[in-house]
Amino acid sequence: MNVLGIDIGGSGVKGAIVDIDSGELLSQKIRFITPNKPTPKKIFDGIKSNILDELKWDGNVGCGFPGVVKKNKIYSAANIEKKWIGLNLKKKFHKKFNLRCKAINDADAAGLSEIALNPKVVKSGTVLVITVGTGLGTSMFIDGKLIPNFELGHLKMYGDSAEKYASNLARKKLNLSWKEWSARFTEYIEYIEFLFSPHQIIFGGGISKYFNEFESNLKSKCEIIPAKNRNNAGIIGAATSFK
């Protein structure tokens, strides 16, 4: 079964057609930059012109969103306009495009992709997936079962949210070296380990393509591995959530 996976993010919106049985991308990955003041109208207009029209897609859609999502309805919006809160993505896709859609938290989508397709993921115990980009997305799995909407990027560090301190956006804003940023991210990991004692951490998100640059600087009590699907994990997981 093929499904269009869409990953809405604070810096970009990505989409591709996915074979949800194998996790393989069957089309080119299309990305457009998240517009300033990314309202639902701006994002949906971009999805239509850049993704749906380009791929000539009229089938099912799985959509990852950066916020709490319950039964396709958005309850929070991180690094994106608050006008999204209260919107039901399933109903919106049907009304605007006449397409069936299932919505999921974006980090949960990335996590589902890794749990299903990454052979290095442990099968039992607690696994934490962290997607590092504009913010810090997290998903938690216990014995392979997802705990949805586990938003640990909003834990407080130094009087503000952790993602303001240790995200890739924070690294860019402060022009931090990999070593300097890794020290900050290690502090975040230590905080997470103190609270939840994960058996394994999977490192994903846009910055994961540089994992080899900073892997040796990350300190943890548990194993840290890179996401197998790197920055495509959100697309693949969003699509496979349609099962």
Image: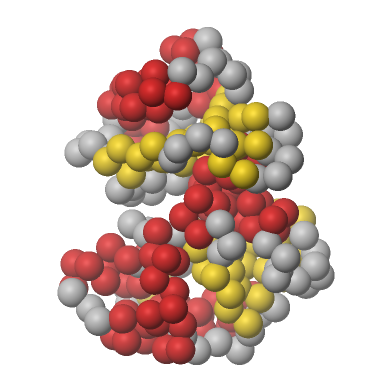
Q: Is residue 206 above or below residue 16?
A: below
- For residue 94, side relative to residue 160 (left or right): right
Image x and y of residue 14, in percent: 41, 40
Q: Place residue 26 in its image quadrant.
A: top right
State the residue at coordinates (30%, 48%). 11
Provide residue 45's location: percent of width, then percent of height. 32, 21
**Colour option used:** secondary structure
83 shown above or below 52: below
The answer to which of 148 and 222 lies nearer the viewer is: 222
Whether residue 104 is visible here, answered yes or no, is: no
Residue 100 seen from this side: yes
Q: Does 93 sit left or right of 225 as displayed? A: left
In the image, residue 48 above or below residue 186 = above
Which part of the image, by quadrant, shows the C terminus? Answer: top right
- Residue at the location (50% across, 35% down)? 27
Please state which of residues 242 and 87 is positioned toward the viewer in this rendering.
Answer: 242
Residue 230, position as x, y percentages in the image: 50, 59
Which of 81/242 is in front?
242
Q: Residue at x 40, y 27 (%)?
A: 51
Q: Position of residue 81 (x, y in %)?
A: 30, 38
Q: Quadrant of the N terminus?
A: top right
The total number of labels drawn is: 0
**Residue 53 sits in which quadrant?**
top left
Please report the residue visible at 55 percent of the width from the left and 87 percent of the height from the top.
220
